[in-house]
């Protein structure tokens, strides 16, 4: 048996230990896999023989665990000894405080929270801001949809306590960058002012902690803790809806902080006035500072995001591919990222380069798995059932009257019911160009004016599709 030194003798930092692991892993896995899956991992902490590493998202763990479980477990044991344990920290935005283990660990030692803040005199050494360092302004791409929110965020980060943006309230749909942006402010602040107490958490976690505080009779401590922050960042404030007691407490914390000029940053899926079920006095306070929305990214922004993210993953995709993805995945940035990750997975798993075919397949996989979202294919299928024509015929150059009719209607409804661009819709119908889609759309609209019954029929079909998809 080979003699294993304890890590204390060997490694003084998580970086050193992980560097050693990487060397071994590199010799055991294909180059592309190494680059895509292992290089992005960051060592965070080494306590005893337990190494804690950060992965960009939960999909990483699933994938590594599925394909390289043995490699990674053997490696870690080779490097840190038989008792070695590996703990993953997921930096997903949504799961960023969840820890997962690769192997069945009978007994995980109590971990101190990871702190990204340099301890200073004012900040207790175990203080955790729960900010994810991945969310920076540098990695946040500017687009028309996020211009105001981004500019305001940067300004708060640069001029803490000097702007009138208090609270700063960011709202927008899912996956559009709210969490990224509000954490980027926090990260900027702790870089500029390491002595400031900045804390980030979701309103959901805030509620859970509050309930725990009630149960353990520590409501005062809980409330004082948050009142002592310099910057309080709460994500997804809509979670407070319907939680009266939490709202009351939050109201007091808000007032205390605001009165003493501390910065409050909030995000939500809706603007303040639409947060039905939230106490009016909170809604009015949310409007005291600056409210900024984030809109879905336009095509150029989507391409720019894909380009940057793929470079981060160490792959370079040509413009045709970038544009194809950006044309087909339009609603949110999380999905764009998901697509890249899936592409990497598909490519390294089948050991094949990322070519256009693979991209098309991956995009399709993503759009068919999209929940409760109406797809062009589903619309086509429903319309064709009504007209009793073969679905494939509408994608071919068939000019039979009922096929043309079904095709036009499916195009029309695709434009009405999906967020797809004209170009994308055309691609779904045998690669027809956008002018054909416009023509189809106009013909249907024109016919509505002449034929009341036809309009009723289409409205009925439309509700059926919407109903089935929801
Ligand atoms: P939300 O909180 O609005 O649901 P997130 O902030 O979690 O959205 O964003 C989803 C993903 O998209 C994250 O990985 C984030 O880094 C990325 N992202 C969002 N907006 C941008 C942007 N403008 N530039 C780069 N990445 C972005
Ligand atoms: Mg979020």
Image: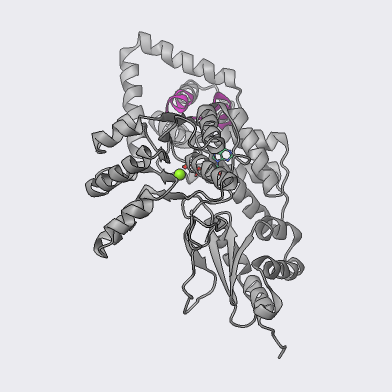
Res 70 visible:
yes
Res 208 visible:
no
Q: Main secondary structure of the magenta part?
A: helix
**Location of residue 66 with respect to 428 vertically, above or below:** below
* Most distant residue in the bottom direction: 1
**Location of residue 10 with respect to 185 vertically, above or below:** below
Q: Is residue 103 magenta?
A: no
Residue appearing at x 23%, y 49% in the figure: 245
* Most distant residue in the left direction: 244
Q: Nearer the viewer, residue 395 or 48?
A: 48
Residues in magenta, as a range: 410-429
Q: Quadrant of the N terminus?
A: bottom right
Residue appearing at x 68%, y 67% in the figure: 18
Residue appearing at x 73%, y 43% in the figure: 316
User: Is 242 displayed left or right of 157 in the figure?
Assistant: left
Q: Nearer the viewer, residue 106 or 140?
A: 140
Q: Is residue 411 magenta?
A: yes
* Most distant residue in the top direction: 450
Kindly indicate the quadrant of the structure image that contains residue 208: bottom left
Kindly indicate the quadrant of the structure image that contains residue 357: top right
**Location of residue 122 with respect to 266 vertically, above or below:** below
Q: Quadrant of the C terminus?
A: top left
């Amino acid at each position: 048996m080979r003699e294993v030194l304890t890590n204390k003798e060997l490694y003084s930092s998580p970086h050193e230990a992980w560097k050693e692991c990487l060397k071994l892993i590199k010799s055991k896995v294909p180059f592309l896999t190494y680059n895509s899956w292992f290089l992005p991992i960051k060592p965070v902490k080494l306590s005893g023989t337990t190494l804690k590493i950060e992965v960009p998202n939960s999909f990483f763990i699933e994938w590594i665990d599925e394909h390289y479980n043995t490699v990674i477990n053997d490696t870690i044991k080779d490097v840190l000894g038989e008792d070695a344990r590996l703990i993953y920290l997921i930096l997903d935005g949504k799961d960023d405080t969840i820890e997962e283990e690769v192997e069945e660990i009978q007994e995980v030692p109590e971990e101190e929270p990871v702190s990204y803040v340099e301890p200073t005199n004012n900040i207790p050494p175990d203080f955790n801001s729960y900010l994810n360092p991945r969310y920076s302004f540098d990695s946040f791409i500017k687009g028309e949809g996020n211009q105001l929110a981004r500019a305001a965020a940067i300004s708060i980060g640069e001029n803490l306590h000097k702007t009138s943006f208090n609270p700063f309230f960011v709202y927008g749909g899912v996956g559009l960058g709210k969490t990224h942006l509000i954490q980027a402010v926090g990260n900027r602040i702790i870089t500029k002012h390491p002595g400031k107490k900045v804390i980030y958490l979701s309103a959901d976690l805030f509620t859970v902690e509050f309930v725990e505080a009630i149960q353990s009779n520590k409501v005062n401590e809980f409330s004082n803790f948050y009142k002592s922050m310099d910057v309080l960042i709460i994500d997804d404030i809509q979670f407070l809806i319907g939680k009266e007691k939490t709202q009351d407490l939050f109201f007091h914390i808000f007032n205390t902080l605001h009165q003493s000029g501390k910065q409050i940053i909030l995000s939500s899926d809706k603007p303040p006035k639409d947060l039905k079920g939230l106490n009016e006095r909170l809604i009015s306070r949310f409007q005291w500072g600056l409210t900024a929305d984030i809109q879905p990214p336009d095509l150029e922004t989507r391409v720019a995001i894909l380009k940057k993210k793929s470079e981060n993953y160490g792959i370079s995709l040509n413009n045709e591919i970038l544009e194809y993805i950006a044309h087909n995945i339009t609603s949110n940035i999380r999905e764009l990222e998901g697509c890249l990750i899936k592409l990497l997975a598909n490519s390294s798993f089948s050991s094949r380069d990322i070519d256009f075919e693979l991209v098309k397949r991956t995009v399709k996989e993503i759009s068919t798995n999209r929940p409760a979202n109406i797809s062009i294919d589903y619309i086509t299928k429903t319309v064709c059932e009504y007209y009793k024509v073969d679905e494939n015929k509408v994608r071919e150059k068939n000019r039979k009257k009922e096929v043309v009719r079904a095709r036009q209607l499916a195009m029309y409804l695709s434009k009405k019911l999906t967020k797809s661009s004209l170009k994308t819709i055309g691609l779904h119908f045998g690669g027809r160009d956008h002018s054909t889609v416009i023509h189809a759309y106009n013909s249907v609209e024109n016919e509505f004016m002449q034929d009341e019954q036809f309009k009723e029929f289409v409205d009925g079909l439309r509700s059926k599709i919407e109903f089935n998809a929801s």
